[in-house]
Image (tube, rainbow, N blue to C red):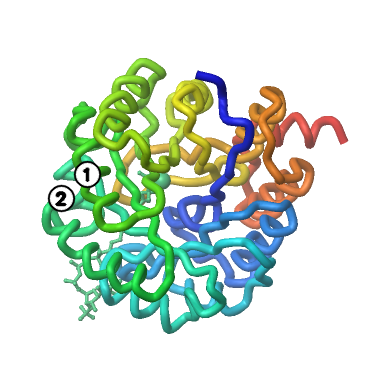
Amino acid sequence: MAYPAKIRMFEAGARDGLQSIKATIPLEVKVGLIDRLTAAGLQAIEAGAFVSPKWVPQMADSAEVLKRIDRAPGVYYPVLTPNMKGYEAALEAGVGADGMGEIGIFGAASESFSQKNINAGIDESLARFEPVAKAATDAGIRVRGYVSCVLGCPYEGEITPAAVAGVARRLEAMGCYEISLGDTIGTGTPGKTRAMLDAVRDELPGTKLGLHFHDTWGQALANLLTGLDYGIDTIDSSAAGLGGCPYAPGAAGNVASEDVLYLLYCLGIETVVDIAKLAEAGRYVMEHLGRTPSSKAAQAIAASV
Ligand code: HMG
Ligand code: MG
């Protein structure tokens, strides 16, 4: 199959990118990052998570972040909502008020990861998501479903493609407009990616899918290329390659947005994102964290100016 002509980049840097960082990141840095990502032209920018502050302290100021960012027309600023409490807090923070609301419900193909991450097994987690998805779709807020551990689990090891397809199907049945398939711990390979996508495509031939790959073993770009072959046209990534789940020990950051964008550019695939401005957003947040971007493309850009 030919690669898609256009790709939607789904930027996870301000949520997945920051959620595991222990030191409290000032509100203005989170807002500064999101505003720079908007300026770079990204059309979907995860802006926070309405989760328990005891579980993920870094996301505790998501409502404030949403109030302070400069929204651009036509851009989605999705947030994670694991249950009705999170959904109601998101509504209170104005999600959906501008007709551009999007929330994420996040399940897993691994029973143990689901327990560790959201304190519920797979069936119980899906039962919690159901009223959230219904309330949101009734309110005109679109719902994205995530499946974690699609290419391996930090607690169980191998996960079967059939388990991934089963959870994806149940999320799709709740009305999710897209299912994001997460290699949470970055242990995927192109062969495993193919087996997983074959199973998901058998189960959900027409469903919109996204690829959400972490880059622990350096295979994320190769795995993404495999996914593009299936016609998948949404890629989740994080500026500067930040990221990781606090409940996925050993996982590295998401694939870097700058590296993805450079790959797409080289393949002649259209995006609407400006790589120099994207690299500037990554540099901005990394400077505040006292780190250098793990993105090779960002490093090459920095070396060339
Ligand atoms: P729980 O402890 O089972 O919740 O946590 P509970 O319903 O029993 O309530 C206990 C307390 O939490 C109560 O407060 C609730 O009010 C409060 P208390 O009475 O003790 O003061 N609570 C909440 N507070 C704020 N917001 C809420 C909320 N819900 C309950 N929404 C819960 C269950 C799901 C809340 C918890 O496990 C949690 O917050 N987990 C989130 C973990 C997380 O955010 N992980 C990272 C995101 S997933 C990810 O990164 C993977 C992804 O990137 C894809 C990939 O890479 O694979 C998406
Ligand atoms: Mg992730």
At 42% from the left edge and 43% from the top edge, which residue is drawn? 208
Q: Circles 2 and 1: CB distance less than 8 Å?
A: yes
> Mark 1 is on which residue type?
Val
Q: Image quadrant of residue 148?
A: top left
Q: Earlier in the sequence, mark 2 or mark 1?
A: 2
Q: Position of residue 256 (x, y in %)?
A: 58, 38
Residue for point 73% across, 52% down: 40
Q: Residues within 10 Å of mark 1 (few under 14, many from 20)?
A: many
Which residue reaches farthest bottom? Answer: 92
Instruction: Name the side, left or right, on which 193 lies relative to 239.
Output: left
Task: Calculate the distance from the C-alpha at mark 2 to the C-alpha at mark 1.
Answer: 8 Å
Identify residue for label 2: 122
Residue at 32% across / 30% down in the picture?
201
- On the question of residue 58 being in view, the answer is no
- The type of residue carrying mark 2 is Ile
**Left-right relation of 305 to 187:** right
